[in-house]
Amino acid sequence: MSLWGRSRRAGSLSLLAALAVSSFAASAFPGGVTTSGGAGAKSAPRATSPVRLPQGRPLADTVLAVVGRGRTIDAETFRRGWAQIAPPARADSLTPESARRFLDLLIDKEALAERAVEETFEWTSLESAEVVSIRDRTMMRTALDSALTVAARARAARGEPPLGAEALGVAARESTVSRLDVTYEETLVARLAKAFADIPHPSGDSSLWSRLQVMGQMPNIDPADSARVVAWSSAGTYRVGELRDAWQKLNPIFRPRIENAEDVHDLVENGLFERLLRRDAGQHHMERHPRVVEAVQRQREYLAVQYFIMREVFDQIPTDSLTLRRFYDKDIDVWGIPTRLQVVRLLLPERGEASRMAVRLRDPAEAETLVARARRERVDYTAEITARGDSALFAAAMTSGTGTVLGPDSVSGGWQVVRVNAVLPSQRRAFDDVRQLVQRSWSDQDGERRIQALLATLRKRTRVVVNEPALARLVRQGIRRAAPGPRSARPR
Protein backbone atom coordinates (compact mmCIF):
# COMPACT_ATOMS: atom_id res chain seq x y z
CA MET A 1 0.00 0.00 0.00
CA SER A 2 1.31 3.46 -0.86
CA LEU A 3 -0.80 6.32 0.43
CA TRP A 4 1.48 9.20 -0.42
CA GLY A 5 1.23 8.59 -4.16
CA ARG A 6 -2.52 9.28 -3.98
CA SER A 7 -2.01 12.85 -2.89
CA ARG A 8 -0.39 14.52 -5.85
CA ARG A 9 -2.02 17.89 -5.15
CA ALA A 10 -3.32 17.51 -1.60
CA GLY A 11 -0.98 20.08 -0.08
CA SER A 12 -0.97 19.20 3.62
CA LEU A 13 -0.64 15.50 3.01
CA SER A 14 2.20 15.98 0.52
CA LEU A 15 4.10 18.08 3.04
CA LEU A 16 3.46 15.65 5.88
CA ALA A 17 4.64 12.80 3.66
CA ALA A 18 7.84 14.65 2.77
CA LEU A 19 8.57 15.41 6.41
CA ALA A 20 7.78 11.86 7.51
CA VAL A 21 10.14 10.37 4.95
CA SER A 22 12.95 12.86 5.66
CA SER A 23 12.61 12.38 9.41
CA PHE A 24 12.80 8.61 9.03
CA ALA A 25 15.73 8.71 6.60
CA ALA A 26 17.74 11.04 8.80
CA SER A 27 17.10 8.92 11.86
CA ALA A 28 17.85 5.55 10.31
CA PHE A 29 20.72 6.68 8.12
CA PRO A 30 22.42 9.82 9.42
CA GLY A 31 23.33 12.23 6.66
CA GLY A 32 20.66 10.91 4.32
CA VAL A 33 18.44 13.41 2.49
CA THR A 34 15.04 12.90 0.74
CA THR A 35 13.61 15.68 -1.44
CA SER A 36 10.06 16.18 -1.88
CA GLY A 37 7.61 18.96 -2.40
CA GLY A 38 4.00 19.87 -1.94
CA ALA A 39 1.60 22.75 -1.43
CA GLY A 40 2.21 25.26 1.32
CA ALA A 41 0.55 25.19 4.71
CA LYS A 42 -0.74 28.70 5.45
CA SER A 43 -2.59 28.29 8.70
CA ALA A 44 -2.03 30.98 11.31
CA PRO A 45 0.10 30.20 14.37
CA ARG A 46 -1.90 28.43 17.03
CA ALA A 47 -2.09 29.19 20.70
CA THR A 48 -0.13 26.77 22.90
CA SER A 49 0.72 26.19 26.51
CA PRO A 50 3.40 28.15 28.41
CA VAL A 51 6.98 26.94 28.16
CA ARG A 52 6.79 24.46 31.01
CA LEU A 53 6.53 20.70 30.96
CA PRO A 54 3.60 19.15 32.84
CA GLN A 55 6.05 18.14 35.61
CA GLY A 56 7.21 21.74 35.90
CA ARG A 57 10.64 21.21 34.32
CA PRO A 58 11.76 23.86 31.80
CA LEU A 59 12.45 22.80 28.23
CA ALA A 60 16.02 22.43 27.06
CA ASP A 61 17.35 25.26 24.90
CA THR A 62 17.52 22.98 21.84
CA VAL A 63 13.90 21.79 22.17
CA LEU A 64 11.36 23.84 20.24
CA ALA A 65 8.23 21.92 21.23
CA VAL A 66 6.91 18.92 23.10
CA VAL A 67 3.87 17.23 21.58
CA GLY A 68 1.47 14.90 23.34
CA ARG A 69 3.05 12.39 25.70
CA GLY A 70 6.62 13.56 25.21
CA ARG A 71 7.37 13.66 21.47
CA THR A 72 9.98 16.40 21.05
CA ILE A 73 10.87 18.63 18.11
CA ASP A 74 14.37 20.08 18.39
CA ALA A 75 16.16 22.76 16.38
CA GLU A 76 18.04 20.22 14.26
CA THR A 77 14.79 18.48 13.30
CA PHE A 78 13.36 21.87 12.31
CA ARG A 79 16.39 22.74 10.18
CA ARG A 80 16.39 19.35 8.48
CA GLY A 81 12.69 19.59 7.68
CA TRP A 82 13.02 23.16 6.43
CA ALA A 83 15.80 22.08 4.06
CA GLN A 84 13.64 19.21 2.80
CA ILE A 85 10.78 21.43 1.63
CA ALA A 86 11.51 23.86 -1.18
CA PRO A 87 9.61 27.09 -1.90
CA PRO A 88 6.80 27.73 -2.67
CA ALA A 89 5.78 24.89 -0.38
CA ARG A 90 7.31 26.93 2.45
CA ALA A 91 8.30 30.56 2.82
CA ASP A 92 11.36 31.84 0.98
CA SER A 93 12.92 33.19 4.16
CA LEU A 94 12.85 32.35 7.84
CA THR A 95 10.88 34.93 9.78
CA PRO A 96 9.11 34.64 13.15
CA GLU A 97 5.82 34.07 11.30
CA SER A 98 7.14 31.52 8.77
CA ALA A 99 9.08 29.70 11.48
CA ARG A 100 5.95 29.36 13.61
CA ARG A 101 3.89 28.11 10.67
CA PHE A 102 6.52 25.51 9.85
CA LEU A 103 6.79 24.45 13.47
CA ASP A 104 2.99 24.01 13.47
CA LEU A 105 3.38 21.65 10.51
CA LEU A 106 5.97 19.60 12.41
CA ILE A 107 3.64 19.57 15.42
CA ASP A 108 0.83 18.29 13.18
CA LYS A 109 3.09 15.48 11.99
CA GLU A 110 3.93 14.41 15.53
CA ALA A 111 0.31 14.62 16.71
CA LEU A 112 -0.80 12.54 13.74
CA ALA A 113 1.89 9.94 14.38
CA GLU A 114 1.06 9.69 18.08
CA ARG A 115 -2.59 9.04 17.28
CA ALA A 116 -1.83 6.57 14.47
CA VAL A 117 0.43 4.33 16.55
CA GLU A 118 -2.39 3.77 19.02
CA GLU A 119 -4.06 1.63 16.34
CA THR A 120 -3.20 -1.91 15.23
CA PHE A 121 -3.02 -2.46 11.50
CA GLU A 122 -2.35 -5.62 9.52
CA TRP A 123 0.65 -5.11 7.26
CA THR A 124 1.18 -6.64 3.87
CA SER A 125 4.04 -9.09 3.42
CA LEU A 126 5.96 -6.38 1.54
CA GLU A 127 5.58 -3.90 4.40
CA SER A 128 6.72 -6.52 6.90
CA ALA A 129 9.76 -7.20 4.71
CA GLU A 130 10.49 -3.44 4.62
CA VAL A 131 10.63 -3.32 8.42
CA VAL A 132 12.96 -6.34 8.52
CA SER A 133 15.15 -4.75 5.86
CA ILE A 134 15.32 -1.46 7.77
CA ARG A 135 16.34 -3.33 10.93
CA ASP A 136 19.03 -5.30 9.10
CA ARG A 137 20.49 -2.33 7.20
CA THR A 138 20.59 -0.13 10.29
CA MET A 139 22.12 -2.91 12.38
CA MET A 140 24.84 -3.45 9.76
CA ARG A 141 25.42 0.30 9.51
CA THR A 142 25.83 0.42 13.28
CA ALA A 143 28.24 -2.53 13.24
CA LEU A 144 30.29 -0.86 10.50
CA ASP A 145 30.38 2.44 12.39
CA SER A 146 31.64 0.56 15.44
CA ALA A 147 34.36 -1.12 13.36
CA LEU A 148 35.41 2.22 11.90
CA THR A 149 35.60 3.76 15.36
CA VAL A 150 37.87 0.93 16.54
CA ALA A 151 40.04 1.31 13.44
CA ALA A 152 40.34 5.08 13.90
CA ARG A 153 41.36 4.67 17.55
CA ALA A 154 43.94 2.05 16.63
CA ARG A 155 45.45 4.36 14.04
CA ALA A 156 45.56 7.22 16.53
CA ALA A 157 47.24 4.98 19.12
CA ARG A 158 49.94 4.11 16.56
CA GLY A 159 50.45 7.79 15.77
CA GLU A 160 49.09 7.44 12.24
CA PRO A 161 47.23 10.34 10.58
CA PRO A 162 43.42 10.30 10.48
CA LEU A 163 41.65 9.10 7.33
CA GLY A 164 38.43 10.07 5.61
CA ALA A 165 35.45 7.77 5.96
CA GLU A 166 35.98 5.97 2.65
CA ALA A 167 39.71 5.42 3.19
CA LEU A 168 39.12 4.39 6.80
CA GLY A 169 36.57 1.83 5.65
CA VAL A 170 39.05 0.32 3.22
CA ALA A 171 41.74 0.26 5.91
CA ALA A 172 39.38 -1.44 8.39
CA ARG A 173 38.40 -4.04 5.81
CA GLU A 174 41.97 -4.80 4.80
CA SER A 175 43.13 -5.02 8.43
CA THR A 176 40.31 -7.43 9.26
CA VAL A 177 40.64 -9.60 6.17
CA SER A 178 44.43 -9.83 6.51
CA ARG A 179 43.87 -11.94 9.63
CA LEU A 180 41.65 -14.44 7.84
CA ASP A 181 44.35 -16.21 5.78
CA VAL A 182 42.31 -15.92 2.58
CA THR A 183 43.29 -18.12 -0.36
CA TYR A 184 41.65 -17.99 -3.79
CA GLU A 185 40.74 -20.40 -6.55
CA GLU A 186 42.54 -18.24 -9.09
CA THR A 187 41.27 -20.11 -12.14
CA LEU A 188 37.70 -19.42 -11.03
CA VAL A 189 38.63 -15.84 -10.14
CA ALA A 190 39.89 -15.31 -13.70
CA ARG A 191 36.60 -16.57 -15.17
CA LEU A 192 34.64 -14.26 -12.87
CA ALA A 193 36.83 -11.30 -13.77
CA LYS A 194 36.14 -11.92 -17.48
CA ALA A 195 32.40 -12.22 -16.87
CA PHE A 196 32.37 -8.86 -15.05
CA ALA A 197 34.66 -7.18 -17.59
CA ASP A 198 32.33 -8.29 -20.41
CA ILE A 199 29.52 -6.11 -19.01
CA PRO A 200 29.24 -3.26 -21.57
CA HIS A 201 30.32 0.24 -20.68
CA PRO A 202 27.40 2.72 -20.75
CA SER A 203 27.60 5.17 -23.61
CA GLY A 204 28.20 8.75 -22.54
CA ASP A 205 25.71 10.12 -25.07
CA SER A 206 22.92 7.65 -24.28
CA SER A 207 19.87 8.54 -22.20
CA LEU A 208 19.91 8.17 -18.43
CA TRP A 209 17.50 5.25 -18.65
CA SER A 210 19.71 3.50 -21.20
CA ARG A 211 22.78 4.00 -19.02
CA LEU A 212 20.96 2.62 -15.98
CA GLN A 213 19.91 -0.45 -17.97
CA VAL A 214 23.52 -1.11 -18.96
CA MET A 215 24.85 -0.52 -15.43
CA GLY A 216 22.16 -2.82 -14.07
CA GLN A 217 23.29 -5.81 -16.12
CA MET A 218 24.51 -8.85 -14.22
CA PRO A 219 27.68 -10.72 -15.22
CA ASN A 220 27.10 -13.82 -17.34
CA ILE A 221 28.33 -16.41 -14.83
CA ASP A 222 28.15 -20.10 -15.68
CA PRO A 223 25.39 -21.62 -13.49
CA ALA A 224 27.70 -24.53 -12.76
CA ASP A 225 30.06 -22.11 -10.98
CA SER A 226 27.45 -20.73 -8.58
CA ALA A 227 27.98 -23.36 -5.89
CA ARG A 228 31.76 -23.41 -6.27
CA VAL A 229 34.09 -21.98 -3.65
CA VAL A 230 36.01 -18.96 -4.88
CA ALA A 231 37.90 -18.37 -1.60
CA TRP A 232 38.77 -20.14 1.64
CA SER A 233 39.37 -18.34 4.95
CA SER A 234 39.33 -18.81 8.70
CA ALA A 235 35.87 -17.19 8.59
CA GLY A 236 34.64 -19.94 6.26
CA THR A 237 34.39 -20.47 2.54
CA TYR A 238 33.02 -17.90 0.12
CA ARG A 239 31.07 -19.13 -2.87
CA VAL A 240 30.35 -17.61 -6.25
CA GLY A 241 26.63 -17.48 -5.49
CA GLU A 242 27.30 -15.27 -2.46
CA LEU A 243 29.41 -12.93 -4.57
CA ARG A 244 26.72 -12.70 -7.25
CA ASP A 245 23.96 -12.05 -4.70
CA ALA A 246 25.99 -9.30 -3.00
CA TRP A 247 26.62 -7.66 -6.38
CA GLN A 248 22.93 -7.78 -7.27
CA LYS A 249 22.00 -5.96 -4.06
CA LEU A 250 24.28 -3.02 -4.88
CA ASN A 251 22.68 0.05 -6.39
CA PRO A 252 23.72 -0.02 -10.09
CA ILE A 253 24.71 3.65 -9.90
CA PHE A 254 27.35 2.91 -7.25
CA ARG A 255 28.64 -0.44 -8.48
CA PRO A 256 32.39 -0.33 -9.05
CA ARG A 257 33.73 -1.38 -12.43
CA ILE A 258 35.24 -4.91 -12.19
CA GLU A 259 37.99 -5.43 -14.75
CA ASN A 260 40.50 -7.92 -13.35
CA ALA A 261 41.30 -10.55 -10.72
CA GLU A 262 42.32 -7.95 -8.14
CA ASP A 263 38.87 -6.35 -8.39
CA VAL A 264 37.25 -9.75 -7.82
CA HIS A 265 39.46 -10.19 -4.73
CA ASP A 266 38.07 -6.88 -3.47
CA LEU A 267 34.50 -8.14 -3.89
CA VAL A 268 35.29 -11.31 -1.97
CA GLU A 269 36.99 -9.34 0.80
CA ASN A 270 33.93 -7.09 1.04
CA GLY A 271 31.77 -10.19 1.44
CA LEU A 272 33.97 -11.67 4.15
CA PHE A 273 34.18 -8.33 5.96
CA GLU A 274 30.38 -8.04 5.90
CA ARG A 275 30.10 -11.60 7.20
CA LEU A 276 32.26 -10.74 10.20
CA LEU A 277 30.33 -7.51 10.79
CA ARG A 278 27.09 -9.47 10.76
CA ARG A 279 28.54 -12.03 13.15
CA ASP A 280 29.73 -9.25 15.46
CA ALA A 281 26.33 -7.55 15.29
CA GLY A 282 24.64 -10.78 16.35
CA GLN A 283 27.05 -11.46 19.19
CA HIS A 284 26.60 -7.96 20.59
CA HIS A 285 22.82 -7.95 20.06
CA MET A 286 22.95 -4.82 17.95
CA GLU A 287 19.31 -5.26 17.07
CA ARG A 288 18.77 -3.70 20.52
CA HIS A 289 20.97 -0.69 19.75
CA PRO A 290 19.04 2.59 20.18
CA ARG A 291 19.70 3.59 16.56
CA VAL A 292 18.26 0.29 15.29
CA VAL A 293 15.30 0.41 17.63
CA GLU A 294 14.53 3.99 16.60
CA ALA A 295 14.79 3.21 12.88
CA VAL A 296 12.38 0.29 13.19
CA GLN A 297 10.03 2.34 15.36
CA ARG A 298 9.94 5.15 12.80
CA GLN A 299 9.21 2.76 9.95
CA ARG A 300 6.39 1.21 11.97
CA GLU A 301 5.12 4.70 12.69
CA TYR A 302 5.35 5.64 9.01
CA LEU A 303 3.22 2.64 8.05
CA ALA A 304 0.74 3.31 10.84
CA VAL A 305 0.23 6.90 9.66
CA GLN A 306 -0.40 5.69 6.10
CA TYR A 307 -3.05 3.23 7.24
CA PHE A 308 -4.63 5.72 9.62
CA ILE A 309 -4.98 8.45 6.99
CA MET A 310 -6.24 5.95 4.45
CA ARG A 311 -8.98 4.87 6.86
CA GLU A 312 -9.85 8.28 8.31
CA VAL A 313 -9.52 10.35 5.12
CA PHE A 314 -9.44 8.60 1.78
CA ASP A 315 -11.78 5.72 2.61
CA GLN A 316 -14.36 8.35 3.64
CA ILE A 317 -14.37 10.24 0.33
CA PRO A 318 -17.58 9.54 -1.66
CA THR A 319 -16.85 8.63 -5.29
CA ASP A 320 -20.33 7.74 -6.54
CA SER A 321 -21.44 9.03 -9.92
CA LEU A 322 -23.81 11.63 -8.46
CA THR A 323 -21.08 13.22 -6.33
CA LEU A 324 -18.59 13.26 -9.19
CA ARG A 325 -21.16 14.66 -11.61
CA ARG A 326 -21.96 17.53 -9.26
CA PHE A 327 -18.25 18.31 -9.01
CA TYR A 328 -17.92 18.20 -12.81
CA ASP A 329 -20.95 20.45 -13.34
CA LYS A 330 -19.53 23.21 -11.10
CA ASP A 331 -17.20 24.24 -13.91
CA ILE A 332 -17.62 22.20 -17.08
CA ASP A 333 -15.05 24.24 -18.99
CA VAL A 334 -12.22 23.32 -16.64
CA TRP A 335 -12.37 19.72 -17.91
CA GLY A 336 -12.15 20.70 -21.54
CA ILE A 337 -9.15 20.85 -23.83
CA PRO A 338 -7.84 24.44 -23.80
CA THR A 339 -6.93 26.50 -26.83
CA ARG A 340 -3.59 25.25 -28.13
CA LEU A 341 -1.04 26.42 -30.64
CA GLN A 342 0.57 23.90 -32.94
CA VAL A 343 4.15 25.03 -33.49
CA VAL A 344 7.53 23.95 -34.81
CA ARG A 345 10.07 24.70 -32.10
CA LEU A 346 13.84 24.34 -32.32
CA LEU A 347 16.57 25.09 -29.82
CA LEU A 348 20.00 25.92 -31.24
CA PRO A 349 23.27 26.63 -29.43
CA GLU A 350 24.33 29.78 -31.33
CA ARG A 351 22.37 32.91 -32.22
CA GLY A 352 23.70 33.02 -35.78
CA GLU A 353 22.60 29.44 -36.39
CA ALA A 354 19.20 30.23 -34.90
CA SER A 355 18.83 33.29 -37.17
CA ARG A 356 19.52 31.17 -40.26
CA MET A 357 16.99 28.60 -39.06
CA ALA A 358 14.39 31.35 -38.62
CA VAL A 359 14.83 32.30 -42.28
CA ARG A 360 14.31 28.68 -43.34
CA LEU A 361 11.18 28.31 -41.20
CA ARG A 362 9.54 31.33 -42.82
CA ASP A 363 9.23 29.24 -46.01
CA PRO A 364 6.28 26.85 -45.42
CA ALA A 365 7.66 24.21 -47.79
CA GLU A 366 11.11 24.37 -46.19
CA ALA A 367 9.60 24.09 -42.71
CA GLU A 368 7.53 21.06 -43.74
CA THR A 369 10.55 19.36 -45.29
CA LEU A 370 12.64 19.99 -42.15
CA VAL A 371 9.99 18.45 -39.90
CA ALA A 372 9.53 15.43 -42.21
CA ARG A 373 13.27 14.71 -42.31
CA ALA A 374 13.51 14.94 -38.54
CA ARG A 375 10.63 12.50 -38.07
CA ARG A 376 12.35 9.95 -40.30
CA GLU A 377 15.22 10.15 -37.83
CA ARG A 378 12.76 9.78 -34.92
CA VAL A 379 13.08 13.43 -33.87
CA ASP A 380 9.93 15.53 -33.51
CA TYR A 381 10.22 19.32 -33.76
CA THR A 382 6.46 19.92 -33.47
CA ALA A 383 4.74 20.78 -30.21
CA GLU A 384 1.49 22.07 -28.76
CA ILE A 385 1.63 24.96 -26.31
CA THR A 386 -1.06 26.40 -24.07
CA ALA A 387 -1.41 29.58 -22.05
CA ARG A 388 -0.89 27.57 -18.89
CA GLY A 389 2.19 25.76 -20.16
CA ASP A 390 4.06 28.77 -21.57
CA SER A 391 2.11 31.99 -21.11
CA ALA A 392 4.68 34.34 -22.66
CA LEU A 393 5.21 32.30 -25.82
CA PHE A 394 1.47 31.62 -26.13
CA ALA A 395 0.63 35.33 -25.92
CA ALA A 396 3.32 36.31 -28.43
CA ALA A 397 2.26 33.59 -30.87
CA MET A 398 -1.44 34.50 -30.62
CA THR A 399 -0.55 38.14 -31.32
CA SER A 400 1.69 37.37 -34.30
CA GLY A 401 -0.72 34.86 -35.88
CA THR A 402 -0.26 31.66 -37.84
CA GLY A 403 2.55 31.33 -40.34
CA THR A 404 4.83 33.69 -38.45
CA VAL A 405 8.22 32.89 -36.94
CA LEU A 406 9.23 34.08 -33.47
CA GLY A 407 12.84 34.43 -32.47
CA PRO A 408 15.60 33.78 -32.14
CA ASP A 409 15.04 34.28 -28.41
CA SER A 410 17.58 33.59 -25.68
CA VAL A 411 16.30 30.84 -23.39
CA SER A 412 17.82 28.36 -21.01
CA GLY A 413 20.03 26.07 -23.06
CA GLY A 414 20.45 28.20 -26.17
CA TRP A 415 18.43 30.16 -28.74
CA GLN A 416 14.82 29.30 -29.52
CA VAL A 417 13.06 29.66 -32.86
CA VAL A 418 9.32 29.00 -33.18
CA ARG A 419 7.03 28.82 -36.23
CA VAL A 420 3.30 29.11 -35.50
CA ASN A 421 1.49 26.55 -37.68
CA ALA A 422 -2.09 26.57 -36.41
CA VAL A 423 -4.46 27.61 -33.63
CA LEU A 424 -6.41 24.66 -32.24
CA PRO A 425 -9.64 25.86 -30.58
CA SER A 426 -10.73 24.74 -27.12
CA GLN A 427 -13.08 21.78 -26.81
CA ARG A 428 -15.47 20.71 -24.10
CA ARG A 429 -15.30 17.11 -22.96
CA ALA A 430 -18.22 15.04 -21.73
CA PHE A 431 -18.33 13.73 -18.16
CA ASP A 432 -17.83 10.12 -19.25
CA ASP A 433 -14.67 11.10 -21.16
CA VAL A 434 -13.03 12.74 -18.14
CA ARG A 435 -14.51 10.76 -15.26
CA GLN A 436 -11.09 9.55 -14.06
CA LEU A 437 -9.71 13.09 -14.08
CA VAL A 438 -12.78 14.33 -12.20
CA GLN A 439 -12.47 11.59 -9.58
CA ARG A 440 -8.76 12.25 -9.07
CA SER A 441 -9.28 16.00 -8.70
CA TRP A 442 -12.25 15.49 -6.38
CA SER A 443 -10.28 13.05 -4.22
CA ASP A 444 -7.42 15.53 -3.95
CA GLN A 445 -9.73 18.42 -3.03
CA ASP A 446 -11.94 16.54 -0.60
CA GLY A 447 -8.92 14.71 0.80
CA GLU A 448 -7.25 18.03 1.60
CA ARG A 449 -10.41 19.26 3.34
CA ARG A 450 -10.66 16.06 5.38
CA ILE A 451 -6.99 15.98 6.36
CA GLN A 452 -7.27 19.59 7.58
CA ALA A 453 -10.34 18.64 9.63
CA LEU A 454 -8.52 15.61 11.06
CA LEU A 455 -5.49 17.71 12.00
CA ALA A 456 -7.71 20.33 13.62
CA THR A 457 -9.34 17.62 15.75
CA LEU A 458 -5.96 16.21 16.76
CA ARG A 459 -4.72 19.69 17.71
CA LYS A 460 -7.60 20.12 20.14
CA ARG A 461 -6.92 16.74 21.75
CA THR A 462 -3.12 16.97 21.93
CA ARG A 463 -1.21 18.93 24.52
CA VAL A 464 1.49 21.05 22.87
CA VAL A 465 4.20 22.99 24.70
CA VAL A 466 6.19 25.44 22.55
CA ASN A 467 9.50 26.90 23.67
CA GLU A 468 9.06 30.41 22.30
CA PRO A 469 12.54 31.67 23.34
CA ALA A 470 14.19 28.70 21.59
CA LEU A 471 12.15 29.35 18.44
CA ALA A 472 13.10 33.03 18.48
CA ARG A 473 16.76 32.06 18.92
CA LEU A 474 16.54 29.72 15.91
CA VAL A 475 15.09 32.54 13.78
CA ARG A 476 17.94 34.86 14.83
CA GLN A 477 20.54 32.21 14.00
CA GLY A 478 18.93 31.39 10.67
CA ILE A 479 19.02 28.10 8.81
CA ARG A 480 22.60 27.03 8.56
CA ARG A 481 23.40 24.06 6.37
CA ALA A 482 23.14 21.12 8.72
CA ALA A 483 26.39 19.27 9.23
CA PRO A 484 26.15 15.79 7.75
CA GLY A 485 25.87 12.95 10.18
CA PRO A 486 28.52 10.23 10.36
CA ARG A 487 28.68 8.61 6.95
CA SER A 488 30.01 5.10 6.93
CA ALA A 489 32.03 4.13 3.90
CA ARG A 490 31.12 1.02 2.00
CA PRO A 491 34.56 -0.57 1.54
CA ARG A 492 35.42 -1.62 -1.96
Image (cartoon, grey):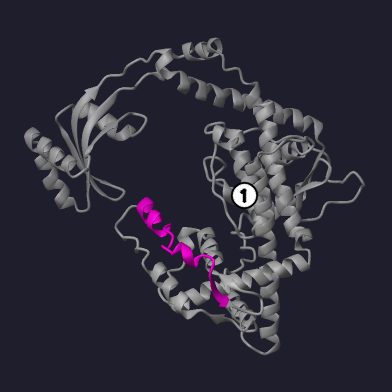
Q: Quadrant of residue 50?
A: top right
Camera sees residue 41: no
Kind of residue sitting beneath label 1: Ser
Quarter of the image for the N terminus: give it.
Answer: top right
**Residue depicted at x 70% and y 36%:** 45
Where does label 1 land, which residue?
22
Q: Quadrant of residue 270?
A: bottom right
Q: Is residue 68 left or right of residue 389?
A: right
Q: Is residue 222 above or below residue 323?
A: below
Label 1 Cα neighbours within 10 Å, binned few <14 / some 14-19 / many ≥20: many
Q: Tag 1, which secondary structure?
A: helix
Q: Is residue 333 above or below residue 158?
A: above
Residue 430 x/y as whole percent: 39, 13
Near-viewer residue (63 or 67): 67
Residue 99 x/y as whole percent: 65, 45
The region drawn magenta spans 208-231
Camera sees residue 400: yes
Q: Is residue 36 left or right of residue 157?
A: left
Q: Is residue 175 magenta?
A: no
Near-viewer residue (473 or 21): 21
**Residue depicted at x 75% and y 65%:** 282
Most extreme residue toward the front is 224
Residue 152 x/y as whole percent: 67, 79
Near-viewer residue (275 or 335): 275
**Residue depicted at x 71% and y 71%:** 146
